[in-house]
Amino acid sequence: MCIQYVKISPRDNRSARCVWRWVVTKNSQRLDYLTQYLIHCNQCYHTRDEPIITDDEYDQLFQELLKLEQENPTLAHPDSPTQRVGSTPLTQLVTKQHQQVMLSLDNVFDEPSFLKYHQKLTQRIATFHYSCELKLDGVALSLRYQSGVLIEAITRGDGHIGEDVTHNAKTIASIPLKLLANDYPDQLEVRGEVIIKKNDFKLWNRGNDTKLFANPRNAASGSLRQLDSQETAKRPLSFVAYSAIGDSQPDSQQATLARLKHFGFSVTAKYLKTAIPEKVIDFVHQTESSRQALDYEIDGVVIKVDSLKQQSLLGHTSRSPRWAVAFKFRAEEAKTTVKSVTFQVGRTGVLTPVVSLEPLALGGVVIQHASVHNIGELTRLDIRAGDVVWVKRAGDVIPQISRVEPNQENRSPAVTIPSHCVCCGSPVYYSDNRLFLYCRNVACPAVLKGSLKHFVSRDAVHIEGVGKQLIDVLVDQKLVTSIDGIYRLERASLLSLPRMGAKSVDKLLRAIHDSRSVELYRFIFALGILEVGVQTAKTLANHYQSMDALQNASYDDLLMLTDIGPSTARQIVSFFNDPHNTNILISLLDLGIQPWIKSTSNTTLLRDEVIALTGRFDTCSRRDLITQIESLGGVYSKQITKQTTLLLAGAKPGSKLTQAKQQDGLKIMVESEWLQWLAAKQDK
């Protein structure tokens, strides 16, 4: 047992010094032992999956160590397990430049594509081996060690610049705060993936009272970017290493993985070294067929040239290494049974089929409903109640029914396509291409509810406190019968509603009153004009500067604007030619809505730029980037058009990057280049 204190007579200073040294020595020995032993326990549990003590025993020793360190702070070790509990929250994450760029991998999706890649390699190097590893679906992270001690952790970002998340990385038990072996180089960078294991994700998501995450990757990303490391410490993050950069490196990827294990890191449990491309393909197929049995999400196999010397000879392009490729799996599919097919009415009056399914787990989530985009798709697939169907889900997209299992017997009758609105009973009408059914009753409760939800939403007039539940009550009780009715609500009527006390009602009425002063583009967006999203609304507001000017815009005038094509121009003209819409607009303005537009002074830095975005960005959100572009006088473009002058490409860019490369004179920048370019413009 560790001695906590010894009482000494103040007169006997010599004895006091001797006993104090003895107590400190005993404390120091016990503290050293507990620190090293608990580090070893963590290593066995998190890296080898071989726990050597129970959770209760670990907790008791951890508390003893914590108490010792609190009473003897000068004796605490920097790599102590207690250092993982988190520290004071930050106010914001700072960005840092990678010492060596973190490149993304090119992808192949089938055997011919991989064999074509293999053929290219054989033209550059005569003989070589592949190292094949699982491609974990997590968040890439770079760890820097100096003299064996963790000093920095940076996210991938755009490959050049990432966010400093050292405070959070130190809370992850599978990241050594100090490398376990002593034969480490002075400087070492370890790269890997931060993940949450499937079972850990289920348990944590189940006990999370606030935000539920759709899948482990989203949860890992959100956890790693927390400002409060004490919050991150509560989350079951793991780190799996896949590469190292530093002095005295081994000669192969396989040897690198062995060395990383030697230093105390987890590496992928399944890998293959081979010189035969057919064996690589077999490994990919075997891995894909057994992926569900793994305790972590994977989305492919990473295939690397094993020799580090050959990797160096092959080099890399500006975006990806030539010596590695990711063989991505197909979108996950699973079979389930259709319970029912119903129809719901949206704010535009479109009747959309909704397929209710027997619950199935797919892509890390439980799916009970799937999308069928329109009536035409429902008819083409011929989905019926009781059918066995295949559902696919790629990434975070809405689950979709890809096909109906063929040759099923005793099927239910085909779904009856409604002739009248399922909400208000009005006749419905087909679109010209017969893909969509519309309810044209402007007083339809479902249309009104959808329109109101859109009108009060955050990107529109943003009335705090008016949500789906309240809107349903207001429409059902006929307190609001059109969009402008939200501004006619009276205190007495609201007080009669359930769960609406005087304070809540007064707060709601203040929010409704405050929303009367609204930025012009938000008001245009709130009107719900078909094909007019937030960015198109901003384009219209910046050009026309007032509702009156916009109402009088002609089809030809609208076509002159960036991002507005023939279809959108027709929808805008049609909207303002509809007497119902113009009456609502007049009523809203009469009720005190005052659209205003921001001053354009000092916003000419990007005046001549039309900028598109692709991929994920690390230094700020896409929304913030768009705001930045527009605040500096630039125009944000949702698509690559002839007017686009610049494409800003983040991590994992989409098809816009390919389009941009084919367009002469269009600048392409990654995030770090964008920041440097902006800074240079501002300096001028």
Image (cartoon, helix red, strand yellow):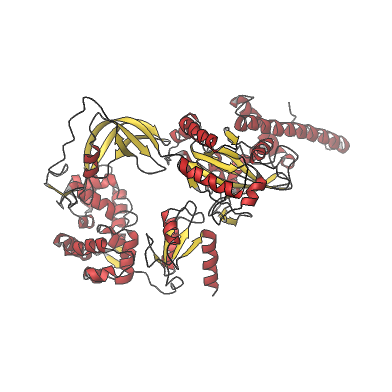
Q: Give the total number of marks visible in the rendering.
A: 0
Whether 17 is drawn above or below 226: the answer is above
Query: Looking at the picture, how far across and down is residue 631, in whole percent?
Result: 42, 67
Whether 167 is drawn above or below 364: the answer is below
Query: Looking at the picture, how far across and down is residue 671, in whole percent?
Result: 51, 59
Q: Is residue 218 visible?
A: no
| Relative side of 7 to 584, left or right | right
- Considering the image in quadrants, where does the N terminus appear? top right
| Relative side of 513 to 324, left or right | left
Q: Residue at x 49, y 46 (%)?
A: 107
Query: Looking at the picture, how far across and down is residue 620, in whole percent?
Result: 49, 56
Q: Nearer the viewer, residue 31 or 606?
A: 606
Q: Nearer the viewer, residue 469 or 572?
A: 572
Q: Residue at x 71, y 44 (%)?
A: 148
Query: Looking at the picture, how far across and down is residue 209, in whole percent?
Result: 43, 37
Q: Nearer the viewer, residue 117 or 62?
A: 117
Q: Residue at x 66, y 41 (%)?
A: 252
| Relative side of 209 to 548, left or right | right
Q: Residue at x 22, y 63 (%)?
A: 570
Give the quarter of the image for residue 633: bottom left
Q: Is residue 466 visible?
A: yes
